[in-house]
Image: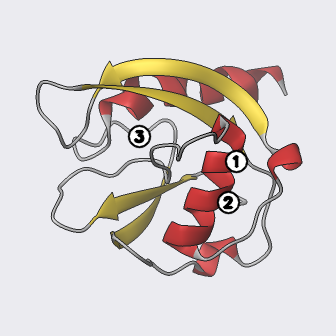
Amino acid sequence: MRNSDGRVLHVRKRGTDMFMLPGGKPEAGETADVTAVREIAEELGFELESASLIPLGVYRSAAANEAGFVVEAAVFVAPAVPGIESAAPQAEIEAIDWIAPTNTRADVAPLNHDHVFPALRTLDAAA
């Protein structure tokens, strides 16, 4: 999810140091898009339609908050959601931040710096 300035919505889970994209592990039988919709609803309280999600890619990277582990993430671009900029943390989410894809903050997940941000910059350049 991006705001009108192109910054990307990030969340930080309670008890962790790194900001990452909202999301989580699929439940039995869930497809990646259905998982994304469910996780956005749980973590931010916003409803999305899975048909509106645009696949950005599937990426593997060092896990942000679990040293020695690798995360594989199916990443989607979501349409503009009215009111999303006023989202408040829910469930296990402690903080929300909107981070520009050009940012190199040390507290952002490697997945985003290494894969998601470059893909978004390429998408922006093509637009």
Determine whether the residue tagged by mark 3 lies in a helix, strand or loop.
loop
Mark 1: amino acid: Val
State the image coordinates of residue 53 (x, y, percent, origin top left).
79, 43
Q: Name which residue type carries label 2.
A: Asn
Residue 122 locus on image (x, y percent): 67, 20
Disc 1 target residue? 34
Mark pair 1, 3: CA separation: 29 Å
Report whether 83 appears left or right of 117.
right
Note whether residue 25 is visible: yes
Q: Nearer the viewer, residue 26 or 71?
A: 26
Q: Earlier in the sequence, mark 1 or mark 3?
A: 1
Residue 86 image point, x, y percent:
60, 81
Q: Residue at x 31, y 30 (%)?
A: 110
Q: Identify the image quadrant of the C terminus.
A: top right
Sequence-wise, which precedes: disc 2 or disc 1? 2
* Corner quadrant of residue 103: top left
Tell whether 59 sits left or right of 12.
right
Is residue 1 visible from the viewing direction of this image? no
What crowding class fits label 1: few (fewer than 14 Cα within 10 Å), some (14-19), or many (20 or more)?
Answer: some
Q: Which residue is mark 3?
A: 103
Mark linked to residue 124: none
Residue 123 versus residue 30 in the image, above or below: above
Residue that mark 2 sits on: 3
Near-viewer residue (44 or 25): 25
Considering the numbered disc 2 on the image, is that residue within a helix, a strand or a loop? loop
* Camera-side mark, 3 or 2: 2
